[in-house]
Image: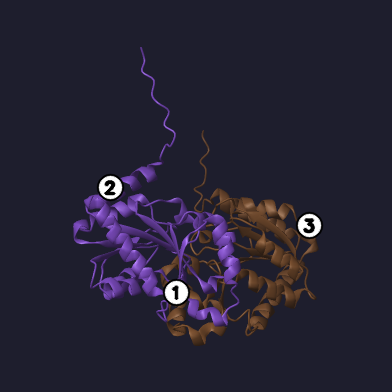
Chain colours: A brown, B purple
Amino acid sequence: MKQRLPVVENILSANDQLAEENRSHLDAANLYAINLMASPGAGKTSLIEETIKRLSGYLDLAVVDGDIATSIDADRAAAAGAAAIQINTGGECHLDAVMFKSALKQLDLSKFDLLLVENVGNLVCPASFQLGTHQNVLIASIPEGDDKPYKYPPMYRGVDALVINKIDLLPYIDFDMEYFQRGVEVLNPGLVTFPLSCSSGEGVDAWVTWLQKKVSDHKKADRN
Amino acid sequence: MKQRLPVVENILSANDQLAEENRSHLDAANLYAINLMASPGAGKTSLIEETIKRLSGYLDLAVVDGDIATSIDADRAAAAGAAAIQINTGGECHLDAVMFKSALKQLDLSKFDLLLVENVGNLVCPASFQLGTHQNVLIASIPEGDDKPYKYPPMYRGVDALVINKIDLLPYIDFDMEYFQRGVEVLNPGLVTFPLSCSSGEGVDAWVTWLQKKVSDHKKADRN
């Protein structure tokens, strides 16, 4: 008699399966990882630089930088004091779990406490590809305009935290924060949000404190 | 005896073939079309609004708006006084020739002189898909940063004109115009460039004058 296979309700895509493997490797090394996504020029690299500056005395940091060309971002992260791996996607508009796996292989994971992944600058494609990081974070920025949650719902819906960068430009730009935040709340109720400016430094400490707590909670959970 | 087929040196992709058909329809109607591409929030819709305001007394304008969700942009174009068609790509990160064809079917092409196409906000994907427009125009913006030509070469390489928007923000942002333009020059030598601000209005007239000349040259060529 033939055996019946149980119906698998959640069939993971090949990418998501590999993302789960990546997560297992990170957890085995007790390394906490964040996937930073944003439009081109929203300030991913600047936020990474500011984060490295504030945390490098306390945590060992690594950065994985995804771009379609150049190593400008990885060079900036390395100059700020982190171990940095550049992935050039060769034209692809997002990182995926395969690329992330190949980057992880180049790092001695057990040496680091926090891994910041800078995805390709894009508000569409990266939303569909899990990497295996512990958190997905979106960086919005004031000059992009207050309508972005309405126009890019999959990205806003899929993240665990939101940074609103370049708040120093609020006096010079017509940006309705209430309208923006209403759009975010509909898509992702209660989303933790960090309004900040990488150029003035305002608000960056709150982001870094949150990140530190995430790393320390993760280490504690691992010990228990 | 079998006949030998000549080797076709440029085999067009299905998309490019359809783009050529779209171009034929536009030319048959004597309608000049521009494909506007940019990052999210670089100011595509604002530039379209300013263009409509300045040209609506002289030319009949239509707008095709591509977005992954909402009709915010088409509503703004319609409010500014143009016929507007919204394409929701259903998650796709770019317009393609098939989508553009379906939009063209909804317009009486012979009624218009100039068609502005607003592509999905993205610096990667739209570069690979010709629509059949007469010109591809990239809108960069000051807050995006001066390294974008280096980081998104296919987009900068493939366009016929470049708008540099939000120059009113130059006093508040660390943007090295010389470094930016050097990157552009390497990828696309002699590219026609329009530095402007949709919020102050500075430089917009030069862009509009160029556009008017393109439309009028195209009409003349068609008559000859």
Q: Nearer the viewer, residue B135 or A19?
A: B135
Q: CA distance from mark 2 to mark 3?
A: 57 Å
Residue B128: where, in percent of width, then height? 46, 51
Residue beneath label 2, please? B24
| Residue in front for this viewpoint, A29 or B135 | B135
Q: Chain of mark 1?
A: B
Q: Secondary structure at mark 1?
A: loop
Q: Earlier in the sequence, mark 1 or mark 2?
A: 2
Q: Chain of mark 3?
A: A
- Give amino acid for label 1: Leu
- State if disc 3 and disc 1 touch (CB < 8 Å): no
Looking at the image, the residue that sits furthest to the front is: B224
Can residue A137 be seen? no
Q: CA distance from mark 1 to mark 2?
A: 32 Å
The residue where tag 3 is placed is: A108
Badge 2 element: helix
Q: Quadrant of residue B172?
A: bottom right
Q: Are marks 2 and 3 on the same chain?
A: no
Looking at the rendered structure, the kind of residue marked 3 is Asp
Circle 2 marks a residue in which chain? B
In the rendered view of the protein, which quadrant contains the N terminus of chain B?
top left
Residue drawn at 45 percent across, 78 percent down? A146
Q: Residue at x 35, y 54 (%)?
A: B134
